[in-house]
Amino acid sequence: MTDTPHFKRVALIGIGLINSSIARVMRRDGLADSIVACARQKETRDTALSLGIVDAVTDDPAEAVTGADLIVLGVPVGACGAVAEAMAPGLEKGAIVTDVGSVKRAVVNDVLPHLKEGVHFVPGHPIAGTEHSGPAAGFAELFRGRWCILTPLAATPPEATEKVMAFWRKAGSMVEVMDVEHHDRVLAITSHLPHLIAYTIVGTVDDLSTATKSEVIRYSASGFRDFTRIAASDPVMWRDVFLNNREAVLEMLGRFSEDLTALQRAIRWGEGDKLEALFNRTRAIRRSIIEAKQA
Amino acid sequence: MTDTPHFKRVALIGIGLINSSIARVMRRDGLADSIVACARQKETRDTALSLGIVDAVTDDPAEAVTGADLIVLGVPVGACGAVAEAMAPGLEKGAIVTDVGSVKRAVVNDVLPHLKEGVHFVPGHPIAGTEHSGPAAGFAELFRGRWCILTPLAATPPEATEKVMAFWRKAGSMVEVMDVEHHDRVLAITSHLPHLIAYTIVGTVDDLSTATKSEVIRYSASGFRDFTRIAASDPVMWRDVFLNNREAVLEMLGRFSEDLTALQRAIRWGEGDKLEALFNRTRAIRRSIIEAKQA
């Protein structure tokens, strides 16, 4: 059984796809006395208010976190440091700060220096998303059946980690705790490299002549389509992911490029047995994903 | 309005995903007096018969096509030449031969020499599929809303093309006629390159340690998952596609590799503006696919 966590005031810094989905879960399950969203754009704040998923909005991070016992950073990872600095004056002792960024080392390095003693940081990463962005794109079921990774630090009190964990379980997620560096390596291959490759091939198509491009779109169900969903993900968020997990992404990209060159050579020299052997191996992974209920 | 085509005897050479779906369409709409399937494996023939989607089965292509007014080659493109040679003795004047292969130049070159005068060849390619194979995987709705490309030759009588076209329209497809070489170039980028890349990255993951691999599978919803569906496609079919559309695939792969190297460089040098500009461009293509109702 999952204990139901409760918060007095939840400050959502950024109110895009993920944080607006968190707001909906908190509303649905009555997990917070009040929810305040902080966003720079007036249009975003207005949308969040009119959706009825938050009680108040502000463009001032310090004001948002004042009196909050839970703060969720839901901004592109490259913006976390500046946001943490801006909210620091409002942070109160005992508050829990968590985030939802796809990179953990860079976020920890950027955020931690701005947190005063007695503020507890529980870095987090819900493995969930769609190709849509903004507060209207969120929904409470987004996290159901998905994993959420937490990477608590040596100084994080276990009770703080437990409380964040309890929230994610209420949202329907399975929670895994791991080391910051390990997270970044695993996500480099499972998420960052796939996005990089998808962005690349969609860009390659975009460079074709207009006539050819329209044919590729027409016949996209033959394969290309599968890449376009993730290549439609939020541009600023993903720019920041690649810049902030550079080493691990370049390492995995190196492996991929070697493998692609080997396959290119096999095609050029007509080595059908090598191709078939690889294509048989890759089928098994799809079956594993289906068995893991992540298909 | 689409005229309803009718055939006396349809010979399906190979009875996998595509041909078994064709059989189901023909059954559903009463388009054939009889349907015979030809397959090498006894198990496949037994399955096709027990599904009730064909009237007879045989392992002899010549026997299958005897008396047939429509023959559909539904075998891997590398096997089309040998199959055409084997069925040649049974072919009758006036018969229409079509195929469903993902490559057209190689199939035309391999099949045409075996067709006697008065047998009409209408090369075809339905842009539809799933990651599943075999006669049990087919379904009549597979082609609905999808495109089918026909690449008739100079010698193909327009009436033969029309009749094949009428079948595909009954199956729910939109039909496009194009030149053989043009087909192979467009499909190289829209289908063959995406499959090649998907096979590669899934292979890269398969080479990781068992522990890391199980984590990639667990967190695959973060991006990797989108590649695994097409990397689970039929290994022999895809081996043959790459070997038989080598030039166009290598050309598109060259473009992709250049683009990937440029992106790698941008990440290494922290050129966030270049990344963001690309990621904004690629979003637009997803919208085009949604508007084209191919998402």
Image (cartoon, coloured by chain):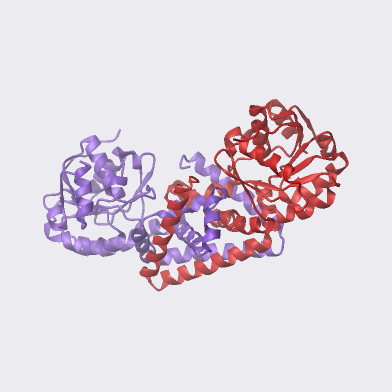
Chain colours: A red, B purple
Q: Relative to A274, does residue B224 appear above or below in the rendering?
A: above
Judged from this view, the residue extending furthest toward the right is A89
Answer with left or right where residue A252 lies relative to residue A114. left
Residue B91, x across and y down, in percent: 14, 56
User: Left of B46 or right of it: where is B226?
Assistant: right
Q: Above or below — where is B135 with respect to A25?
A: below
Q: Residue at x 57, y 55 (%)?
A: A190
The answer to which quarter of the image holds residue B216 is bottom right
The single residue placed furthest to the bottom in the displayed view is: A269
Q: Is residue B19 visible?
A: yes
Q: In the image, B136: left or right of B228?
A: left
Q: Identify which residue, B241 or A33, lies in the foreground.
A: A33
Q: How many marks?
A: 0
Given residues A102 and A237, the one toward you in this image is A102
Quadrant of residue B190 within the rendered picture? bottom left
Q: Does residue B191 show up?
A: no
User: At 58% from the left edge and 34% from the top edge, which residue is drawn?
Assistant: A141
Place of residue A87 in the rendered image (x, y in percent of width and height, measured from the top left): 83, 42
> Residue A54's spot in the image, x, y percent?
72, 29
Residue B4 lies in what quarter of the image?
top left
Pick the quarter of the image with the N terminus of chain A: top right
Residue B125 placed where, x, y %? 33, 51
